[in-house]
Amino acid sequence: RGRNAVPFLFEQDWTMWLGGDQLGRPLLARIIVAASNTMAVATGAVIASMVIGSSLGLIAGYSRGRAGQMIPRLADVIMSFPSLLLAVIVLYMLEPSVGNIILVLAITRIPVYLRTTRAEVLEIRERMFVQAAVVMGASTPRIIFRHILPVILPTLVTIATLDFAFVMLAESSLSFLGIGIQPPEVTWGLMVAQGRPYLTSAWWLSFWPGLAIILTTLSLNLLSNWMRIALDPTQRWRLETGG
């Protein structure tokens, strides 16, 4: 019952409102489960890359020694490989598990946070309040975590929101290619791939998860734009005046 069932919003069983897949499973329920898996991978990758990249960026930006010169070269090495190609190569060699996918996607996004944090720290460390803290004898960890990090944190949060959409699309691409999350687990990208053979007869198998990807990505882009204005004191007047 319900194999490739046509979407019908007035169906008694609400889980069948979006139709059924090739095995008769309700698409709405599968999309909800796939959302949790897709979001879990994207969240893990973004948090890991932001923590590692920002930590390295803080060290590279504040250090005036060899670390400040060597750490940026790490970002250059990672960025010399196309991120999606690097993920494909690594996942072909490793088992395409959730942990490996998070690890690969996190590594490819580290340079974004490393270079942004380093650039911000290089400018902030010359400001008067940081110089005053140095003169008063504050320790390096205190200066970094008490005076510098709070200033750059809004920028990092805004980038992470936008990066979440990019990582989610990358995970969906990997699952669509068959080297991401494997059945019986499910993600939106995998659902699109599974519905591809039925595009002419049951287009909704790929349409609904594809629509979920588009709407989520669009929402995250709008959210990051709002956060950029809301977290920047020089731009906040636009929200207050409705501009």
Image (cartoon, helix red, strand yellow):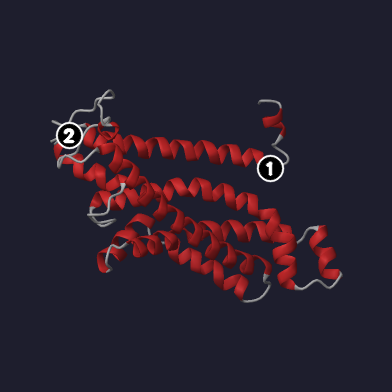
Name the foreground residue: 77 vs 1. Answer: 1
In the rendering, at what x and y percent does residue 68 appear?
A: 62, 71
Give the residue at the far top of this rendering: 10
Quarter placement of the C terminus:
top right
Quarter placement of the N terminus:
top left
Which amino acid type is shown beneath numbered disc 1? Asp
The tag on residue 232 is 1
Give the residue at the far front of this rendering: 12
Per the model, the C-alpha gap separating discs 2 and 1 is 45 Å
Name the foreground residue: 54 vs 18. Answer: 18
Name the foreground residue: 115 vs 202. Answer: 202
At label 2, counting other C-alpha atoms closer than 10 Å, the crowd grade (few under 14, some 14-19, many 20 or more) is few
Q: Is residue 203 left or right of residue 66?
A: left
In the rendering, at what x and y percent does residue 18 appear?
A: 27, 31
Residue 125 seen in the current view: no
Determine the residue positioned at 75% across, 66% down: 143
Which of the marked residues, 2 or 1, is nearer the chain's N terminus? Answer: 2
Which amino acid type is shown beneath numbered disc 2? Leu
Determine the residue positioned at 28% across, 56% down: 181
Task: Return the residue at label 2.
Answer: 199
